[in-house]
Amino acid sequence: MLMIMLFFSILMYFMGLISFCMKRKYFLLMLLSLEFIILSLFMNLFIYLSVYGYEYYLSMIFITMSVCEGALGLSILVSMIRSHGNDYFQLFNLLW
């Protein structure tokens, strides 16, 4: 059972990574694929902590930091939509 969960979490990680690399047109899709990667890493961390019998305190810190990352990404998305009118990532030029 443990190996199946580990396989699915690694598969989730690579699916999120492939989605992040392929869907670079919209900023919202990039944020969603990053959150999917974070969830798969959280699942890997949870499996690791449960196998070795450690406490789950580190997982709570990890999920707190990932929530902060998600809130920061959404705030960047809102400011980008307010300034540019859409969330096309190629339209947003960082060199101007």
Image (cartoon, helix red, strand yellow):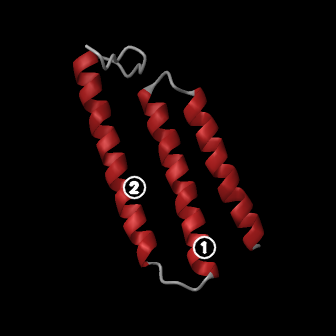
Residue tagged by mark 1? 48
Number of residues whose C-alpha sits closer than 10 Å to that of mark 1, classed few (under 14), some (14–19) or many (20 or more)? some
Task: Depth check: give the residue in front, 24 or 82.
Answer: 24
| Count of marks placed on residues | 2
In the rendered structure, the answer to whether residue 59 lies left or right of residue 44 reads left
Q: Secondary structure at mark 1?
A: helix
The amino acid at mark 2 is Ser
Q: Classify the position of the C terminus by image quarter.
A: top left
Which of labels 1 and 2 is toward the front?
Answer: 1
Q: Are marks 1 and 2 in contact (CB under 8 Å)?
A: no
CA separation, marks 1 and 2? 18 Å
What residue sits 56% from the left and 77% below the top?
49
User: Going from the N terminus, do you reach mark 1 or mark 2 first?
Assistant: 1
Residue at 32%, 53% (x, y): give it: 68
Judged from the image, the secondary structure of the residue bearing numbered disc 2 is: helix
Instruction: Locate residue 60, reporting x and y percent.
Output: 40, 70
Q: Residue at x 29, y 16 (%)?
A: 95
The outermost residue toward the front is: 95
> Along the horizontal axis of the image, is 62 left or right of 21?
left
Image quarter for residue 2? bottom right
* Amino acid residing under circle 1: Tyr
**Quadrant housing residue 15:** top right
User: In this figure, which residue is indicated by the disc labeled 2?
Assistant: 66
Give the image location of residue 35, x and y in percent: 48, 47
Quadrant in which the N terminus is drawn: bottom right
Write down the quadrant of residue 72 in the picture.
Answer: top left
| Residue at (41% x, 64% y) in the render | 62
x and y percentages locating residue 23 in the rendered image: 56, 27
Tell which residue pokes out farthest to the bottom in this image: 53
* Vertical comparison of 93 with 64: above or below: above
